[in-house]
Amino acid sequence: MDESDLEWVLSVEQKSYDYPWSQKGFENSLDQGLNYIFCSEEGELLGYVCMLTVLDEVQLLNFCVAPNHQKKGVGKAAMDALKMKLRESGFNLILLEVRASNLSGQKLYQKCDFHRDGVRANYYRCQLWDEKSMELLEGKEDAVLMSCTL
Ligand SMILES: CC(C)(COP(=O)(O)OP(=O)(O)OC[C@H]1O[C@@H](n2cnc3c(N)ncnc32)[C@H](O)[C@@H]1OP(=O)(O)O)[C@@H](O)C(=O)NCCC(=O)NCCS
């Protein structure tokens, strides 16, 4: 991924998440290190991943498949390829946090041999429907901590 991909990445991000990263967030991730886009054989962009590394550990910060390519095995194939590349580069562990409500994300990670390590309570902000006032209120949501040994 480089700056020329950001327009596409941002448009996918906004369609894919209730709380998308900002342009600044992606610019910071480009400055900080490991970022990839994944593509089809014809060069069509399918998704992206942003990571941070500390020694032999990789923190997966964002992993996203474009909505029109989801549920076709792209996420699984991209994660398998990424794990192989990271293993070959000498990394030993991938860590990530995923919203407790993000069941598709957790299922994908389980399918890719990530294990659930625990929960970080009230980690993410979210909106909750309040029956009493009949409006959306700012709330908190747990993060599920997962890891995969390479
Ligand atoms: C989560 C995400 C990356 C999955 O990518 P994908 O390409 O659709 O996943 P795949 O087609 O490779 O599916 C792999 C497995 O993930 C799970 N999965 C994927 N989409 C799912 C869905 N909508 N509901 C339930 N499980 C789902 C299934 O276990 C699936 O295996 P199966 O088809 O054999 O049952 C994709 O939905 C996405 O980008 N979502 C928005 C961003 C996001 O939430 N990222 C993860 C948190 S950081």
Image: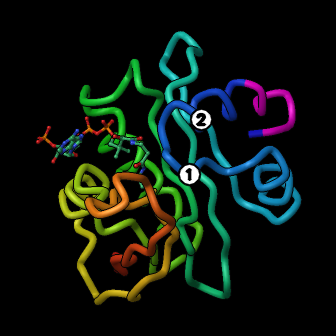
Q: Residue at x 40, y 88 (%)?
A: 120
Please give the range of residues in magenta.
Answer: 2-7
Q: Which image quarter: residue 103?
A: bottom left
| Residue 76 located within the stretch drawn in magenta | no
Q: Is residue 146 visible?
A: no
| Callout 2 secondary element | helix
Left or right: 90 in relation to 87: right
Colouring: rainbow
Q: Which residue is mark 2?
A: 14
Does mark 2's beta carbon lie closer than 8 Å to ligand 1? no
Q: Is residue 70 above or below residue 86?
A: above
Q: Position of residue 28 (x, y in %)?
A: 84, 59
| Residue 5 located within the stretch drawn in magenta | yes
Left or right: 106 in relation to 58: left
Dot 1 or dot 2: first in sequence order is 2
Which amino acid type is marked by label 1? Answer: Tyr
Q: Position of residue 62 (x, y in %)?
A: 55, 56
| Callout 1 secondary element | loop
Nearest the viewer among 5 and 7 is 7
Q: Is residue 6 above or below residue 80?
A: above
Q: Quadrant of ligand 1?
A: top left
Q: Is residue 145 visible?
A: yes
Q: Which residue is mark 1?
A: 19
CB atoms of marks 1 and 2 within 8 Å? no
Q: Which image quarter: residue 140?
A: bottom left
Q: Residue at x 47, y 28 (%)?
A: 66
Left or right: 102 in relation to 46: left
